[in-house]
Image (cartoon, grey):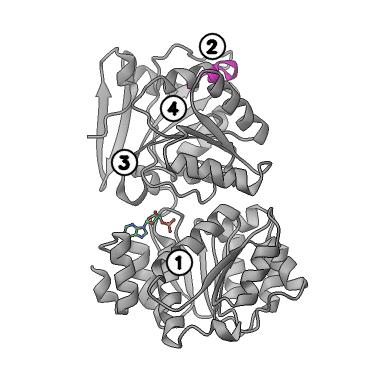
Amino acid sequence: MSFHLLNLTDPILRSLKKEGYTHPTPIQSQAIPVALKGTDVLGCAQTGTGKTAAFAIPILENLAKTNGNHRTKKIRSLIVTPTRELAIQIDESFKSYGRYTDLKSAVIFGGVGQNSQVKELKRGVDILTATPGRLLDLMNQGYISLSDIEIFVLDEADRMLDMGFIHDVKKLLAALPNNRQTLFFSATMPPDIVKLSKSILRNPVKVEVTPESSTVEAISQGIYYVDKGNKKNLLIDVLQDDGIKSALVFTRTKHGANKVVKLLNDRSINAEAIHGNKSQTARQRALSNFKKNTTRVLVATDIAARGIDVDELQYVINYEIPNIPETYVHRIGRTGRAGSDGTAISFCDAQEKSYWRDIEKLIGIKVPVIDEHDFPLVDHNPPEPEKQQNRSSSKGQKFQYAKKRNGQKSSNRSKSGSRKKRRPNYS
Ligand code: AMP
């Protein structure tokens, strides 16, 4: 299907062409026609599926029809998203897709001074993207009124609840006009999200793509069993491979992220951290250096990494295994985006084995074990029978990665002892 079949107007089609988009992604071809009609949407899709354009394009189309009225200083569409990074990226998308319209978009988020945001609001904004805290703050100060909102988007609803924003969301909902269109997006649909969606949406059409657990199938995955104390040595060893041009390393804590950055910098591996203790400017700078390939390794905590959008991110390294299985899917979803290849490797110590078991259960894939490395787990906790089986099957292999594409399984094995060849082959 081409974008032309979606009945989009010329200014939007031109901007999509400029972005280099030729075909809508599945979430776009499903959601855009529904949203264009003014119907509420319940979207089950995670970042990386093209969901931003799935809501941004119909918003721009529908608002442009009645023309940009920012001169009247009414906010007509509001997008609420949990993190600052995501908010900035969404606003950038509106600016890109809406470049040939008269509509004006702006973004507000906490962690920085409010003055420039207030100034922009005063000049008039049609489409506002916001994180909940700053939005409520500026509403309370009288700088923002939601009474003219025609289209409301709740983005990453599951993350929003995980981050404890439920009360903020409820306050926002109370301030929104009843007569509005709502587009609700969530990567997962646990019962509390279903309940929330029911309380917000009116006769929604459900659109769903790549269920959470199947997104990972396009990504080459591998697991190293390693003692906790040896993770740092293993990381340095893995990063000796010059073939790894960019890697996003996940740690569970901010302190852990800082330690990994120091470790890498001490070994002359260019790395920066991105987490909640860094100022907004420092986070943006680190992200921009990473995108420009000035920084080879970005070390992130889960919340800070949420929504990081780096085209062609090659590697995700789980330095620590997340205790929430869905987090693994969110993490590795940073790579292998929009059809590009990606690799995700994980370092699992004895204490993390149960987390890893839950992850494999969720994704429904037995991730190949990379068992020939210099820092094998010397563990008093014997591996479970199925893991022993898995490990012995790959014995003698430096690497064994399974890749599943278009429903087909293929494995990619290297018998070479060369360290340089530790990376999976993308062919
Ligand atoms: P999102 O899920 O909105 O974070 O988008 C993920 C990535 O896909 C972003 O880098 C977008 O620029 C890109 N993207 C979105 N829609 C398309 C499309 N139709 N064709 C190609 N790339 C796209």
Q: Which residue is mark 1?
A: 95
The C terminus: image quadrant? top left
Determine whether the beta carbon of the residue marked 3 sits less than 8 angstroms from the nearest atom of ligand 1: no
* Relative horizontal placement of residue 368, taking residue 409 as reference (left or right): right
For the residues marked 1 and 4, what is the alpha-carbon distance in whole angstroms? 40 Å
Q: Which residue is mark 2?
A: 378
For marks 1 and 4, the one nearer the N-term is 1
Q: Mark 1: which amino acid?
A: Lys
User: Is 425 located above or below residue 334 in the figure?
Assistant: above
Q: Residues within 10 Å of mark 3 (few under 14, many from 20)?
A: some
* Front disc: 2 or 1: 1
For marks 1 and 3, the one nearer the N-term is 1
The structure residue drawn at horizontal position 59% and vertical position 80%, both measured from the top left corner, is 149
Q: Mark 3: which amino acid?
A: Asp
Residue 13, x across and y down, in percent: 30, 72
Where are the magenta residues, as a range? 225-232
For the residues marked 2 and 3, what is the alpha-carbon distance in whole angstroms? 33 Å
Residue 349, x across and y down, in percent: 55, 22
Q: Which residue is mark 4?
A: 223
**For the stretch drawn in magenta, what is the main secondary structure?**
helix
Nearer to me, 351 or 43: 43
User: Is 101 located above or below residue 86 in the figure?
Assistant: below
For marks 2 and 3, the one nearer the N-term is 3
For the residues marked 2 and 1, what is the alpha-carbon distance in whole angstroms? 53 Å
The structure residue drawn at horizontal position 60% and vertical position 55%, both measured from the top left corner, is 84
Q: Mark 2: which amino acid?
A: Val
Ligand 1 resides in the quarter of the picture at: bottom left
Nearer to me, 321 or 350: 321
Q: Which residue is mark 3?
A: 341
Q: Residues within 10 Å of mark 4 (few under 14, many from 20)?
A: many
